[in-house]
Image (cartoon, helix red, strand yellow):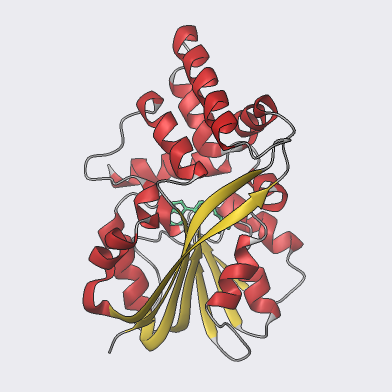
Amino acid sequence: MTTTVKTKHRAMWASGDYPAVASDLVAPLGPALVQAAGIGPGQKVLDVGAGTGNAAIPAARTGATVTASDLTPELLAVGEKNSHVNLTWTEADAEDLPFETGAFDTVISCIGVMFAPFHTAAAAELLRVCRPGGTIGLANWTPEGFIGQMFATMKPYAAPPPPGAQPPPLWGDPAHLASLFGDGVTDVSVERRTLHVEHFRTAVDFRDYFKANYGPTIAVYRNIADDPARVATLDAELLALVERHDLGGGAMNWEYLLYIARRAG
Ligand SMILES: C[S@@+](CC[C@H](N)C(=O)[O-])C[C@H]1O[C@@H](n2cnc3c(N)ncnc32)[C@H](O)[C@@H]1O
């Protein structure tokens, strides 16, 4: 069953054009996380859910020794082709990382690990592969922010999640992270930040871009494809969501949580 879930998730993230989403929209998040996590020369760094290397590539540019890991080999391949810097690209499930205990000085994930469905397992793996005294750094969409609200809007139209799966935006809730990491971390710092997005002129531009390019949105629309009434309702709900967040001229602020902690021990 788990294998089926992973196969589906891999196919979902390979669908559309996530590399475009990474470069058009979320590119500033990677360098922001690298800086907040204090990544620099000589460190051994793991990026989990690295995609095309939005955080892994700027981490490698600091002189760190970086492994970019992800469930979706198609995204790693794009990253590797465009990286122009030396790093290792490895297919890996965040819930079962193929690395030694304590192998990394710093473990980061930029809107990546939050999409692994079994949060407790994924958090335990982040802790396991980080050496005692090392750093865990995460950037996660918050439940209240625009992308968290987009997932809440899409949820009623999505295929039912596997039993025991938890929703991705919970990783943007500091209390949820406290319960996941427990006393496995110390010196926790949590900051709400916003990604300013000016890519879309209109709500329709946004919706059509996400329907064409963003795997989770594509999957939800595929799930309701044989029900035109539901497609129309979701279309309208997404437009209303964007209009509520429009700061004028299509500009939006997308809230995320920046979480930095020291691995206890
Ligand atoms: C929103 S993208 C973020 C990619 C990249 N970190 C960035 O900032 O652009 C989410 C990534 O998480 C990966 N992912 C989803 N589930 C995963 C899992 N169980 N293990 C590892 N990676 C996973 C996807 O393949 C995708 O690359």
Residue at the image position 65 percent from the left and 52 percent from the top:
196
Quadrant in the rendering for residue 79? bottom right
Where's the C terminus, which quadrant?
bottom left
- Left or right: 126 as drawn, with respect to 40: left
Residue at the image position 72 percent from the left and 48 percent from the top:
24
Residue at the image position 48 percent from the left and 20 percent from the top:
234
The answer to whether 29 is drawn above or below residue 208 in the figure is below
- Left or right: 243 as drawn, with respect to 158: right
The answer to whether 48 is drawn above or below residue 99 in the figure is above
- Left or right: 99 as drawn, with respect to 38: left
Work out whether residue 225 can be spotted.
no
Front residue (pair 66, 237): 237
Front residue (pair 174, 16): 174
Residue 216 % position (x, y):
49, 37
- Left or right: 2 as drawn, with respect to 217: left
Residue 3 % position (x, y):
34, 46
Residue at the image position 26 percent from the left and 60 percent from the top:
120
Residue 1 % position (x, y):
27, 42
Residue 257 % position (x, y):
46, 60
